[in-house]
Each structure stands twice: as structure tokens, then as C-alpha cells.
Amino acid sequence: MNIVIFLYENMTALDVIGPYEVLSRLPGADLKFVAENKGVVRSDMKSLGISVDHSIDEIDSADIFLVGGGPGDEAVRDNERVIDWIRRVNENATWTASVCTGSLILAKAGLLDGRNATTHFAARETLAQLGAVPTPERVVIDGNVITGAGVSAGIDMALTLFAKIAGDEFAQAVQLGIEYDPQPPFDCGSPEKASPEMIELVKATLAA
Amino acid sequence: MNIVIFLYENMTALDVIGPYEVLSRLPGADLKFVAENKGVVRSDMKSLGISVDHSIDEIDSADIFLVGGGPGDEAVRDNERVIDWIRRVNENATWTASVCTGSLILAKAGLLDGRNATTHFAARETLAQLGAVPTPERVVIDGNVITGAGVSAGIDMALTLFAKIAGDEFAQAVQLGIEYDPQPPFDCGSPEKASPEMIELVKATLAA
């Protein structure tokens, strides 16, 4: 089970580390972090650097292929070399997955044309402009593509995917192993639950 | 606001990346990942390497000091040089925090003597042996020490801490920004909700 997680500058780390923590526990998982070039990728908050062990020149297939989101997604969408590579890896992937604005990257590669997909709530319009059908769910499956909403939704997405691949019981053991019994301090984690002012504040912060 | 997150070999990445994603958004946050030595630390699932930008020789104080957990916690507890450093950083910290078995490390350093604290559910007995009072809550505050339960609990811990420092409204904006409206696929993420067989399976897997 080859799992490839794509990394890039200015990505949001939790987008991929949540799913990594789950998917790396699949039976026979061989998980690789891949970026355009080897070295270190800095996440959007700068203080975190993740090692890139493999460049896109070395890897061109995956059973599970995951792309996370973050402010750097736009630069990736403009990078034809990377977009071509994403198309190529997707071709033979059993599952292609995204978290947050990672779906904008998949859409730019033409992988979401006419498909239901989700993204960070602030990016729904852009997702539509790129040809997908934005769906305000936390986890959306359409064909062999599974997309998660903003940042923390990657954990729910990955557990859902894990269960599809390895069965409910094993997925439940992983959920218990990472003690995923969330108790958020506030009930405001989606635009459906937050005030209009709070939503505008977050959108403005993300746009800045 | 100086935030120090301690890294070590064989740690569980999500333990610290969840809180990093939240705490790095505190006003004026200057967040540093610190390990015994500079270079790269590999997490317990091996495929992930995190850059260590600072060694413990360079940093000896923090406003917020966070230690995560993972299978490598035992080697850290046996490392007197690191345990001494942890005591030193804690001395002037406004908040000392842990996730998962990170609390075992704090306890070994003597920081939890007689204090209420939480940890991964499979480590509660060890936490008691190290002098703390294990409390089966997801987030526990005792004095200036805040501890989170297993792995994913770091997100709840960090949002709780964020609200104490920067206020509820700002914490809510961060929670919305990372779209933290969790929808776990199963209701089995704590030992109170899982079957005895599942609990034993997870304990055996973690012990192996």
C-alpha cells in the first residue's frame, strides 16, 4: 500500500499530519512525503519545517495520493510541472484525497470536473470556478476522490478512508489509539455554526 | 510570546502539530521547535521527519512550553540532560503543557508531583507511578500546567489554552479558521466509549 503525501511551501501542516497519523497505520502502509524538490518545506506559519525525502522526479504512482491545503496552494496551481505530476500520479491511484484547499489543486489538475467535492469554507467559490461542485460537507466521496473540508477535517477524512480500505473495526482501533473523542471548547467550528461577523473576520484574515 | 515545542525521536507527530497549528496563531507568537540536537527528528511512524532548528543548548526559557508524547517518551525520561533542561525551561514558563505521554516526561521531571494531569488512556498507571494524579479528562488544568489526553486531544488542549491567554472570541476565530467542527466516523475515541476487547487490542498494539 503505497501512500504519497504531497508537500509544498506555505502549506498548512495539520492538513497532512492529521491524515498521516491515521493512514500510516494502514496494514502494509509505505508512506512517503514528496515535494517538487528534496530538502525542507516550511509550513505557512514558518516555524515548522518538514523533511522532503523524495522529489516528484522519483515517484510517479501511489495507491493513496493526498494533497493538503494552505496559502501556498495558489503557487502550486500555477506550477505546470507539479500539476502535470499530480495528473500522472492520480491516473493509477486507487484513492486520490485532499484536505482544505488541496481540492483547489486537484481541481486545477482537472481531477474534479463536475465532481462533488469539499474544501475550506472560505474557498468554496474558487472551487466552483475550477470546475468542481462545492459540497458543504466535512467529508465528500465522489468516485475514487475523497475530499475533506478545512484543516482539521483531514482527520475525519482519513478515518473514513481508512474504514473503506481496512474495515470499520480496524478504523475504530486507530480512532481509539489516537484517542479521537474530540471535545472542542466552542461550538463554532463551521460557518453554519459561527456568526456572520466571525466568518467575515476569518475570511479577511485568511485573505490577508 | 515565546513558545517552545520540544521534539524527540519516536514522538507522535500529531501530538505537537495539532497544538502548533493553534498556538502559532497567538498574537505575537514566536514559536520554536527544539530538540536535544539540531537536525531532523523522525516521528514514530518513521516516514515523517521534522526539522529541528534549535538545540536545547540555545534555548532555556519559554512563555509556553509544550511536550508531546509517543513511544520515544521513555528514552526521554531516561535522559538526565534533557530532563534537567525541561525543569529549567519550566521554571519561568507561564504555561507548561503536554499532550499524550508527554505528561510522563513532565512527571519524570518532577513537575506533576501531586498534581491532577491526564495522558494517553493506556499510560494512566505509569503517570500515577511517576507521582501525578491521573485524571480521565480530555484536558486538565492544575496551576500553570495544562495536560491533554492521547494524541488528538492536543487540539482541544491548545484551543483551551489559547482562550485563557487571548480570550474566547479570538480562540473561536482560530477554531473556525481550522474548521474544527469534528465529525468522527465512529463514537469510540475514548476508553469510556470503546469495548473492553477494543481497549485491550489498542493497549497491546501500543505496548508492542
Image (tube, coloured by chain):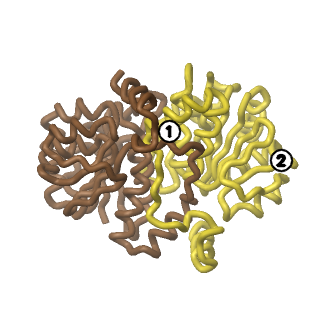
Chain colours: A yellow, B brown
Quarter of image, res B53:
top left
Tell me what residue is drawn at x 49 percent, y 34 percent.
Answer: A174
Given residues A182 and A153, the one toward you in this image is A182
Q: Residues within 10 Å of mark 2 (few under 14, many from 20)?
A: some
Left or right of A154, for residue B87: left
Q: Position of residue A127 (x, y in %)?
A: 77, 57
Please say if B60 is above or below B167.
above
Q: Position of residue A39 (x, y in %)?
A: 50, 36
Given residues A67 and B70, the one toward you in this image is B70
Quarter of image, res A1:
top right
Tell me what residue is drawn at x 29 percent, y 56 percent.
Answer: B140
Which quadrant is the C terminus of chain A positioned in? Answer: bottom right
User: In the image, which is nearer the foreground, mark 2 or mark 1?
Assistant: 1
In what element is the residue under mark 2?
loop
Question: What's the chain of the residue with tag 2?
Answer: A
Mark 1: which amino acid? Answer: Gln
Given residues B109 and A141, the one toward you in this image is A141
Q: Position of residue B78 (x, y in %)?
A: 17, 31
| Marking on residue A81 | none
Q: Judge whether residue B83 can be spotted in this image.
A: no
Q: Position of residue A196 (x, y in %)?
A: 63, 78
Comes first in the chain, label 2 or label 1? 2
| Marking on residue A115 | 2
Tell me what residue is drawn at x 62 percent, y 70 percent.
Answer: A203
Please say if A78 is above or below A126.
above
| Marking on residue A175 | 1
Left or right of A19, for residue A138: right
